[in-house]
Amino acid sequence: MSDRYLAFANSAAGRRLLRALGLPTPVRLERWAAGHARVLDGALLLAGDGDLLASVLGFAHRLSGERYAERPDRLGLPCWKLAEGPRLKALVFDASGLNRFEQLSALRACFQPALKGLGKCPRLVLLGRPPESLEDPQAASVQRALEGFSRSLGKEVRRGGCVQLLYVAAGAEPQLEGALRFFLSPKSAYVSGQVLRLAPCTAQVKDWTRPLAGKQALITGASRGIGAAIAETLARDGAEVVLLDVPAAEDALAALAARFGGRAVTLDIRSEDAPHRLVEALPDGIDILVHNAGITRDKTLAKMSEAQWDAVIEVNLQAPQRLTQALLHANKLREQARVVLIASISGIAGNPGQSNYATSKAGLIGLAQAWAPALGERGISINAVAPGFIETQMTAAMPLALREAGRRMNALGQGGLPQDVAEAVAWFAQPGSGAVSGQVLRVCGQSLLGA
């Protein structure tokens, strides 16, 4: 469903009127499209004094053809100046060297002028060291302070900009390129205010044009909406896709599978024999498992029936656990496999009338956190993606007032698209993204709800 307010805000007349009335004017986001030659179409500023910047400098030429340093005679790059330099498309600030409270002033000194020189839909990423890895209490406190700064900055940057914080553990530096290729590109258009930790990982992407080449992927709930977008994006990145949905969706599923050169499997994941049938349907195993299938049965708890509660828990939480367990026991999840669970910000912030849904989605986040250590011993990562308000058939059916509230109550002032969720899943599915496990990535435009 089209967002008429967003369209009006991006017209010449609408922009003038909304500004005169003091109303928000959200920028139409730039998203990844075929034909992108580089990750960034514009200038990249490298700043900060930590030891991570040297790693970034080694591959920065593959991110952007226009690279600048924060100060003269730094990094062998020209110095960016607000009055003379081009508009910035991205900024990477290495804060890993900050270990004293007074050094936090470097954040203001860098970002204040940079904010005035940003172009449309800019990407800002801070790099730090995991606070829990530091023995010095003050150094750990300084690194933890970066979270407050980055989340606040994400709510100030405007013009469709996004801000992230990556804590990079010692030995995880080789995985920075994959993370920055995602967070500095239009693929992360609806991701902002996020904090992730990178750990060492031996797997590497061999071909950035097709990072999932040779991988087999299974997507549940794949016949439409977010599931179909995930299938399309994984296929774009080189994966061979197996699409799974209920028998009632057989025709749509088969059409999508033919379109992506994949295979369709119809299965009711609630059935007692679903785990056995799924194992049989995957004789060669899979490299990527995406649990997207889910249902809603919304009612306030006072009016919710037992059947409504049980159905949501069974489909959204129990089925992913049963199916994943069966694939593990049958050795159908290959070495270095990637498991992605589609959760929701409802599972983080809660939502009235969705106690069953929020419970199930919070449970999925818990599943990722609980399973990560054991799966990590086999080189398998497991993470959750938590979408916010995404423009789908489900949200199109919401009452107008609720739909508009969902769209506007985030730092970007608009709803996301299924593609935005799919891009996050595709990044988690990459070999190098084994550096991230047991974590949750919100795709919500930095929603005002939840942490």
Image (cartoon, helix red, strand yellow):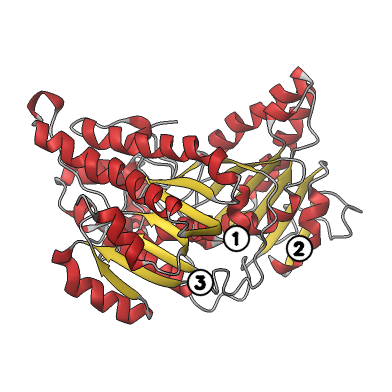
Q: Quadrant of residue 297?
A: top left
Q: Is the Cβ of the residue at disc 1 closer than 8 Å to that at disc 2?
A: no
- Looking at the rendered structure, the secondary structure element under dot 3 is loop
Residue ID at (62%, 65%)? 40
The disc, 1 or 2, on the residue closer to the chain's N-terminal end is 2
Quadrant (top left, top right, bottom left, bottom right) of the C terminus: top left
Label 3 or label 1, whichever lies nearer to me, is 1
Residue 436, position as x, y percentages in the image: 59, 46
Dot 3: few (<14), some (14–19), or many (≥20) neighbours within 10 Å?
Answer: some
**Earlier along the polypeptide chain: callout 3 or callout 2?**
2
> Dot 2 corresponds to which residue?
59
Measure the C-alpha gap from mark 1 to mark 2. 18 Å
| Residue 364 figure quarter | top left
Residue in the foreground of this view, choosing between 26 and 290: 290
Give the SS element for disc 2: helix
Tell me: 12 left or right of 108: left
- Give me the C-alpha separation between circle 3 and circle 2: 21 Å
Tell me where residue 188 appears, x and y as whole percent: 51, 56
Residue type at mark 3?
Asp
Figure check: 320 above or below 87 = above
Q: How far is mark 3 from mark 1, CA to CA?
A: 12 Å
Label 2: how many residues lie within 10 Å, few (<14), some (14-19) or many (20+)?
Answer: few
Q: Which residue is disc 3 drawn over?
A: 237
Which is more N-terminal, label 1 or label 3?
A: 3
Q: Amino acid at mark 2?
A: Phe
Mark 1 highlights which residue? 431
> Visible in this render: residue 396?
yes
Q: Is 96 situated above or below 235?
A: above
Disc 1 secondary structure class? helix
Q: Which mark lies nearer to you, 1 or 2? A: 1
Q: Residue at x 24, y 76 (%)?
A: 254
The three-letter amino acid code for the residue at tag 1 is Pro
